[in-house]
Image: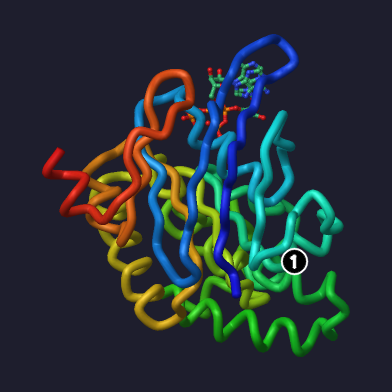
Amino acid sequence: MSDIEFTGVSKTYPDGTTAVHDLSLRIESGSFTVFVGPSGCGKTTSMRMINRMISPSVGTITVGGQDISRVDPVKLRLGIGYVIQSAGLLPHRTVIDNVATVPVLRGQSRRAARQAALEVMDRVGLDRGLAQRYPAQLSGGQQQRVGVARALADDPPILLMDEPFSAVDPVVRTELQNEMLRLQAELHKTIVFVTHDIDEAIKLGDHIAVFGPGGHLQQHDVPRTVLAQ
Ligand code: ADP
Ligand code: ADP
């Protein structure tokens, strides 16, 4: 049960900017939903409200039927993997220890967590030979794979991805997109993916939420229908 539902959610920042306006949206468990639209229309803000990095000004968000404002944010985030554009890796930890971060925090032994980390690395197409490197010794595409591996290490039901592939070159981006499609066919996570690239949205999403100026949701449908409009 990891469906996500926004009901009448708005977000106005303290400086008066309304980033999200009256958003009602249901994201089915197991769907790959892409938030798409130009810069500044509230995609990231909407995503960050799902893991309580940002609180709504009004409205309710539920995950698995539970109002998240009543769930401890630390607990909530254990069930939600998060991947960002810059990968956000810990620079002074090796690849394998970056991937093992959350399982170790949850009390797994370092040895067990490292073993599991190697398996997750296989899954995202990362050569085990990279395990002892530091993030700065990796290419951008490899760093993003480590970011995805780390987000998946604890097997969370939900994965949030904020423009995860927009900083890598087009060839690597295509590779990473294909990897995501393969992974999702295997894992059936509930994925919310933010991009401003409509082609990427159509390629990856089984559902697309189109955001527009003023943080208004304009459409939410399957790609075929979104394209037709
Ligand atoms: P997107 O992800 O679609 O680019 P964002 O959610 O990042 O959009 O931003 C939506 C709007 O809210 C933009 O006008 C942005 O400048 C503004 N915004 C984002 N974060 C903040 C913040 N912390 N304080 C004030 N305004 C913000
Ligand atoms: P991202 O890489 O997710 O697009 P940004 O560079 O847009 O991140 O934003 C970085 C940080 O600055 C975020 O914490 C965001 O909330 C904040 N931010 C974005 N736009 C504004 C704004 N107009 N005013 C204040 N803070 C902002």
In which quadrant of this rendering is ligand 2 seen?
A: top right
Q: Position of residue 185 (x, y in %)?
A: 35, 78
Q: Residue at x 58, y 65 (%)?
A: 158
The residue that mark 1 highlights is: 78
The furthest residue to the top: 15
Quarter location, residue 33: bottom left
Q: Name the quadrant of the N terminus.
A: bottom right
Packing grade of label 1 (10 A; few <14, some 14-19, many >=20) is some
State the residue in front, 92 or 184.
Answer: 184
Q: Position of residue 221 (x, y in %)?
A: 30, 51
Q: Position of residue 180 (x, y in %)?
A: 37, 66
- Is 89 left, or right, of 179 in this rendering? right
Q: Residue at x 34, y 69 (%)?
A: 179
Identify the amino acid type marked 1: Leu
Q: Residue at x 30, y 58 (%)?
A: 204
Q: Position of residue 43 (x, y in %)?
A: 49, 36
State the residue in front, 20 or 192.
Answer: 20
Q: Name the quadrant of the C terminus.
A: top left
Please tell me whether residue 177 is drawn above or below residue 99 in the rendered image.
Answer: above
State the residue in front, 229 or 8.
Answer: 8
The furthest residue to the left: 228
- Is 223 left, or right, of 155 in this rendering? left
Check disc 1 and report its element: helix, strand or loop.
helix
